[in-house]
Image: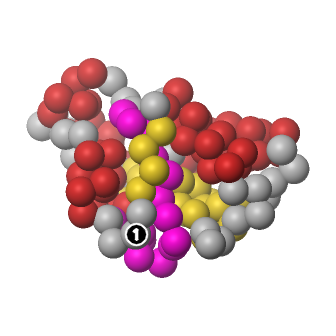
Amino acid sequence: MISRILVPIDDSEMAQQALEYAINNHPDAEITVMHVVGEPSPWGGAATSLALEEDLDEAAEERAEEVFDDARELAAESDVELTTEIQLGHPARAILNRAGDFDAVVVGSHGGSLSDRLVVGNVAQKVFRRSPVPVVVVR
């Protein structure tokens, strides 16, 4: 029985669909939504601007809050409570580091922009291949 689910989310439609899947198919499970801030890119981008912040934790929370607000709104429609978690670093690595604490991971098939998928790599694919627990990839 699946009682604890990790749903990594960003601001993509696929992440929202993954959360919807977890809520609709496992209404009694404890669902933790995790947002990873500061993913690497060859141009610096979010990771560089985050590193320049005075209070790293506060800046990460601010960036994650919009994503969490959307997730909470979606969960409220089904009267489900979520736990939220922020991680810093590379998305696939952060997800895999936490996956073992859950019964399953539900992840969107892709997220972010086309350039992010080409440069950073396919997070869902890395999680699917290396996760110590079952992974549901939602498309």
Instruction: Determine if the magenta segment contains residue 126.
Output: no
Task: Give the left or right position of residue 71, taking residue 134 as reference.
Answer: right
| Horizontal relation, residue 125 to residue 112: left or right | left
Where is the N terminus found, in terms of image quarters? bottom right
* 42 left or right of 116 in image: left
Q: Which residues are magenta?
A: 96-110
Q: Residue furthest top?
A: 114
Residue linked to disc 1: 133
In the displayed structure, 31 sits above or below 107; it is below
Asked if residue 57 shows in the view, the reply is no
Residue drawn 68% across the image and 49% down it? 25
Question: How does the figure colour the protein chain or chains?
Answer: secondary structure
Query: In the rendering, at what x and y percent does residue 116 appear?
Result: 25, 31
The kind of secondary structure element at disc 1 is: loop
Residue 68 place in picture, x, y as percent = 64, 46
Q: In the rendering, at what x and y percent does residue 90 appear?
A: 27, 54
Residue 95 vs residue 44, the one in the foreground: 95
